[in-house]
Amino acid sequence: MYKIMFYVGLVGAIIFLGFSVILFVRNNVAKLIGDITGWNAQRAKKKFDKVREEEATALLSVPVGFFEVEESFIVTHTEERIDIE
């Protein structure tokens, strides 16, 4: 009798474990945990900084005649000043 109860409980536990894994993935709980802990924000900030750095590097490789030149600065359409040294 106890063996049957053990095996029924084991099968039930395995079924519910599979069900919980499916719900975890389907409801994107990993993203929720990342949002709560701030891991997603850190990852997004690093990605944003990398893209911004690449854009700044690409901007400096643009021909100088494309922008107005004042002394040793490039003035962009947003009035940002960038060293061209």
Image (cartoon, grey):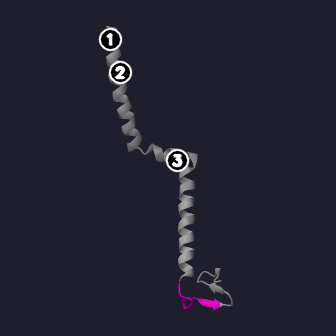
Please name the residue that numbered disc 1 is placed on.
3
- Distance (Cα) linking label 3 and label 1: 42 Å
What range of the chain is rendered magenta?
A: 62-69
Q: Amino acid at mark 2?
A: Leu
Q: Is the residue marked by circle 1 packed among few (<14), some (14-19), or many (20+) residues within 10 Å?
A: few
From what the image shows, is residue 77 above or below residue 50?
A: below
Dot 3 and dot 1 residues touching (CB under 8 Å): no
Please name the residue that numbered disc 2 is placed on.
10
Please name the residue that numbered disc 3 is placed on.
34
Dot 3 and dot 2 residues touching (CB under 8 Å): no
From what the image shows, is residue 20 above or below residue 47?
A: above
Quick one: quadrant of the C terminus?
Answer: bottom right
Q: Residue 36 location in percent, x, y?
A: 55, 46
Q: Nearer the viewer, residue 84 or 25?
A: 84
Residue at image position (38%, 39%) is 23
From what the image shows, is residue 25 above or below residue 72?
A: above
